[in-house]
Amino acid sequence: MEWAEGFQAGRKGWERMAFTKVYGVKVSTVFLGLDHNYEQIGPPIVFETMVFGGPLDREQIRYATADEALVGHEAMVERVALLELDRAAGATKQ
């Protein structure tokens, strides 16, 4: 209900939970506000981590709980960092 009231009051419909910039690549985790579990098997899927930039651009993972989303955010940040370090190392070898 809190999200719905905020949405009605003009908020964009989501809340940013975490945002990290890694070597120019952005990783964002948000509360979606709407259930994205379209098969309706299992819990509602209401959180999403997405990458903007780099080789994982637009990759996303969705979660049921805030705790899962925050752990997933950190895992994605680590993944992006490793890929960006590998890309940088490859560029210096050429």
Image: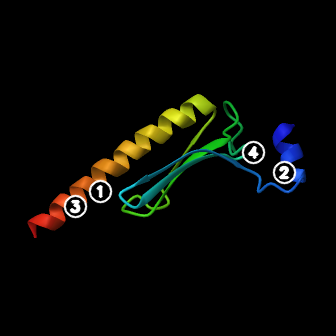
Secondary structure beneath label 4: loop
Residue that carries the numbered disc 1 in the rendered image = 84
Residue at 29 percent across and 56 percent down: it is: 84
Distance between the Cα atoms at labels 1 and 4?
31 Å
Distance between the Cα atoms at labels 3 and 4?
37 Å
Residue that carries the numbered disc 2 in the rendered image = 7
10 Å neighbourhood of mark 3: few (<14), some, or many (≥20)? Answer: few
- Amino acid carrying label 4: it is Gly
Query: Quick one: label 3 or label 4, which is nearer the N terminus?
Result: 4
Q: Given contact means CB atoms under 8 Å apart, are the residues at marks 3 and 4 in contact?
A: no
10 Å neighbourhood of mark 2: few (<14), some, or many (≥20)? Answer: some
Secondary structure beneath label 2: helix
- Amino acid carrying label 2: it is Phe
User: Quick one: quadrant of the C terminus?
Assistant: bottom left
Secondary structure beneath label 1: helix
Residue that carries the numbered disc 3 in the rendered image = 88
Residue 14 image point, x, y percent:
72, 49
Figure quadrant of residue 18: top right
- Amino acid carrying label 1: it is Glu
User: Quick one: quadrant of the N terminus?
Assistant: top right
Horizontally, is 39 left or right of 49 in the view?
A: right
Residue that carries the numbered disc 4 in the rendered image = 33
Q: Which mark is residue 3?
A: none
Residue 87 image point, x, y percent:
24, 60
